Image (cartoon, helix red, strand yellow):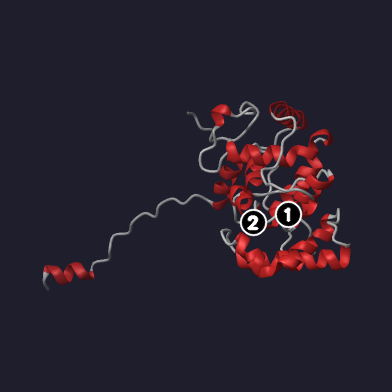
Amino acid sequence: MSDLKQASRRTPAKTKPKPSVPAKAVGKALRARTPRPVDRATMIEIFRRLHAANPEPKGELDYTNPYTLLVAVTLSAQATDVGVNKATKALFPIADTPQKMLDLGEEGLRQHIRTLNFFNTKAKNVIAMAKRLVEEFGGEVPNSVEILETLPGVGRKTASVVVNIAFGDPRVAVDTHIFRVTNRLPLAITKTPLETQEALENLIPGEYRLHAHHWLILHGRYICKARRPECWRCPVNDLCRYPDKTVP
């Protein structure tokens, strides 16, 4: 028998399996890396500093009344505030009430907002929303998150923003920026925007809750950025437990 045939009949040498890391050990390591939420005293200090840096924070969407605020926030989904402001600059002077929006019509509205993502769907929703406001609420924007959520194109975040800014209801609307900042500091460890909102509204001290939405969103937008947070100029850097802080 040739050496080649003999070699083919030999039992291949057994190789030692690489040691695997137990799933429990991986989970434990990940949990160990995730910092625990800050304590109440630290949270109070975080918001004290944010307040000191910006005592009267404002949103960056342009509006003239509760209705135009509702429309602006609805249009801001998957769009920038700058883009929405450009689109509504000529819109709001001619359609600043639900009835005027209905008079403008879906096609007229579409021409004003066609630079925004999903403008066809947004135009349809805004007109349907205006119709309901006129028919069911006398053209007024209701001061109720629960009612606003039933309007076309309005979700929990939009409703919370509107009642917070227009009516002074201390709701904490959660977008991607606020979700990120909440879990980075962390103020709380959460998995969804709704869970985050509920946690923040329960945890943030009452004296800071009204403006918390603005402080957190501006902080996330301009300092605690997604890809490279600017930790070197963060006013709460020493209080933050995020393990991957950046340097200039």
For the residues marked 1 and 2, what is the alpha-carbon distance in whole angstroms? 9 Å
14 vs 24: above or below = below
73 vs 38: above or below = below
* Residue found 32% across the figure and 59% down from its top: 14
The picture quadrant where one finds residue 138 is: bottom right
Report if the CB atoms under discs 1 and 2 are less than 8 Å apart: yes
* Residue found 78% across the figure and 64% down from its top: 130
Asked whether 99 or 172 is in front, the reply is 99
Residue 122 percent across, percent down from the top left? 66, 64
Q: Is residue 25 left or right of residue 181?
A: left
Q: Is residue 222 left or right of residue 159?
A: left
* Residue found 85% across the figure and 58% down from its top: 140
Q: Which residue is mark 2?
A: 77
Q: Which mark is residue 54?
A: none
Q: Is residue 153 left or right of residue 34?
A: right
Total marks placed: 2
Residue type for callout 1 = Thr
Q: Which residue is mark 1?
A: 158
Name the outermost residue toward the front: 94
* Residue found 78% across the figure and 55% down from its top: 67
Name the outermost residue toward the left: 2
In the picture, the quarter occupied by the N terminus is bottom left
- How many C-alpha atoms fall within 10 Å of the one at disc 1: few (<14), some, or many (≥20)? many
Q: Is residue 22 visible?
A: yes
Residue type for callout 2 = Ala
Q: Secondary structure at mark 1?
A: helix
Q: Is residue 152 visible?
A: no
93 vs 152: above or below = above
Query: Which of the two labelled residues, at mark 1 and mark 2, occupies the earlier sequence position?
Result: 2
Asked whether 164 or 67 is in front, the reply is 67
Residue 103 percent across, percent down from the top left? 75, 67
Q: Is residue 171 left or right of residue 216?
A: right
